[in-house]
Image (spheres, helix red, strand yellow):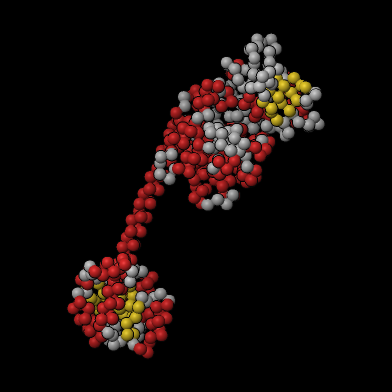
């Protein structure tokens, strides 16, 4: 016996343990009952296996001792049934020498703990019985502990779900459209996670991360919530960039929310370090956050959040792929493509049904193509040192750097070379192959918006005044 059991033996009290003896021989039953009762055990007896099963319905025993050979149902059949119905009860078989092989086989199969030979040795029998009832007591204690743990886990899970519902309700009260967007991100992100063969726990965490990824926005003003991110002036955009960190702060101290909080904090990060709030790169970004980042950008492109004009599902997918491997993991993008195609039609219909922002004039919810901003009016006064994406009043500009970046990313081969921070530096755009009809559209847009083409460098630059 192990040390733990030895401690229990030292404080052993036989009167706390009950034993059921089963034998069709009344003389053996009487002898067992007298011997065990004198030792202090509480003993019940019965002459048949069927009566034993009936007794077990309303009574609890630590140990059953049964004869092997009995009419109607033998001891092995009885103990097999008891093993299934009452697994915490220890089972001992009483057998003659002729049946020792059967008793040993029953032990090997797990139906019997040990066997006692007839006639039995009292000291050996007491040792086996004491060991057996202590084992039953330990099993019951473990079972009770397991039930307690399961109950606690169930309650913790209920609190966990309740916490998620509370945050979701807060989002819905603050901005109903925000919750619809979050549910879409959560569902599609979980489908991508499944296609990547992530564990059930990871899929669930990614789903919850998607559901709560914008929880940091609930503290924003009504005006900020109503304004598309591409329309925000720089002062507000700086605040907007902090919402991922606000969400992390809301959840990081909650049990079971650490991974979810990390996903939320990093869902705007990009592999090349151009994301926010911390500029993480590559594997520094949690996998769940990488999935969320792709999926949210997809929905924001379809909702017009990033460009001011809504894209179709396929246009949004092309825009994501156009950013190359710098921003997103291609393996995740490929799984995302499979999942997005399955729900594209339903998502487009849902987005089309959503009301437009009150602060903007109504516009078609799903555009057939990316709409470029209107060209600059040459008669309007210009601002000194006009730099796209920077300046005193970004909302008065023909376009911002963010709008330009979103537009350029939709054209294959086109790219931006931002040298505005260099002395006499310019903002350069390279539109790619001249033979491409789509890229010719980009050239036309750049011309209308004041960019100048440098044939020597095959690029467009925005001049200073």
26 and 121: which one is in front?
121
Q: Is residue 436 left or right of residue 87?
A: right
Residue at figure coordinates x 22%, y 78% from the top left: 36
Q: Is residue 18 left or right of residue 257?
A: left
Q: Residue furthest front?
A: 423
Classify the position of the N terminus by image quarter.
bottom left
User: To which quarter of the image does residue 144 belong?
Assistant: bottom left
Q: Residue furthest bottom?
A: 98
Q: Is residue 461 left or right of residue 32?
A: right
Q: Is residue 368 above or below residue 121?
A: above
Number of marks present in the image shown: 0
Residue at figure coordinates x 36%, y 69% from the top left: 87
Classify the position of the C terminus by image quarter.
top right
419 and 204: which one is in front?
419
| Residue 101 percent coordinates (x, y) | 41, 85
User: To which quarter of the image does residue 448 belong?
Assistant: top right
38 and 297: which one is in front?
38
Residue at figure coordinates x 35%, y 51% from the top left: 152
Tell me if residue 311 can be seen. yes
162 and 454: which one is in front?
454
Q: Is residue 231 above or below residue 29?
A: above
Tell me if residue 62 can be seen. no
Q: Is residue 311 left or right of residue 182?
A: right
| Residue 306 percent coordinates (x, y) | 60, 29
| Residue 312 percent coordinates (x, y) | 65, 35
| Residue 443 percent coordinates (x, y) | 75, 25
Residue at figure coordinates x 34%, y 80% from the top left: 115
């Amino acid at each position: 016996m192990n040390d733990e059991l030895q401690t229990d033996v030292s404080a052993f009290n036989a009167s706390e343990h009950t034993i059921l003896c089963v034998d069709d021989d009344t003389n053996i039953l009487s002898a067992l009952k007298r011997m065990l009762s004198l030792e202090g055990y509480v003993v019940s007896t019965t002459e048949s296996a069927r009566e034993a099963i009936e007794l077990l319905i309303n009574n609890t025993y630590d140990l059953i001792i049964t004869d092997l050979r009995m009419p109607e149902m033998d001891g092995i059949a009885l103990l097999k049934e008891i093993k299934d119905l009452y697994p915490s009860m220890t089972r001992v078989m009483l057998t003659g020498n002729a049946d020792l092989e059967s008793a040993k086989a029953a032990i090997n199969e797990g139906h019997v703990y040990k066997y006692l030979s007839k006639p039995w040795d009292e000291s050996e029998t007491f040792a086996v019985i004491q060991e057996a009832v202590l084992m039953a007591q330990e099993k019951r204690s473990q079972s009770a502990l397991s039930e307690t743990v399961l109950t606690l886990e169930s309650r913790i899970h209920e609190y966990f779900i309740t916490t998620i519902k509370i945050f979701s309700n807060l989002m819905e009260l603050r901005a109903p459209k925000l919750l619809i967007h979050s549910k879409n991100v959560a569902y599609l992100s979980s489908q991508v996670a499944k296609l990547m063969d992530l564990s059930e726990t990871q899929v669930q965490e990614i789903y919850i991360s998607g559901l709560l990824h914008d929880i940091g926005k609930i503290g924003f003003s009504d005006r900020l919530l109503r304004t598309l991110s591409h329309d925000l002036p720089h002062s507000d955009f700086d605040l907007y960039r902090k919402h991922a960190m606000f969400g992390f702060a809301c959840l990081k101290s909650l049990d079971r929310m650490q991974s979810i909080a990390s996903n939320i904090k990093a869902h705007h990060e990009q592999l090349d370090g151009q994301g926010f709030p911390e500029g993480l790169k590559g594997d520094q970004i949690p996998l769940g956050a990488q999935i969320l980042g792709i999926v949210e950008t997809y929905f924001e492109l379809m909702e017009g959040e990033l460009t001011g004009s809504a894209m179709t599902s396929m246009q949004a997918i092309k825009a994501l792929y156009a950013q190359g491997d710098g921003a997103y993991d291609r393996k995740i993008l490929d799984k995302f493509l499979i999942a997005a195609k399955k729900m594209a039609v339903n998502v487009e219909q849902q987005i089309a049904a959503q009301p437009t922002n009150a602060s903007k004039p109504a516009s078609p919810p799903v555009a057939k193509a990316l709409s470029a901003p209107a060209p600059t009016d040459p008669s309007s006064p210009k601002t000194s040192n006009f730099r796209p994406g920077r300046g005193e009043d970004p909302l008065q500009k023909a376009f911002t750097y963010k709008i330009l970046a979103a537009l350029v990313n939709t054209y294959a081969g086109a790219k931006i070379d931002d040298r505005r921070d260099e002395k006499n530096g310019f903002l350069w755009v390279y539109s790619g192959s001249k033979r491409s009809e789509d890229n010719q559209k980009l050239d036309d847009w750049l011309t209308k918006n004041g960019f100048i083409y440098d044939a020597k460098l095959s690029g467009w630059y925005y001049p200073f005044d």
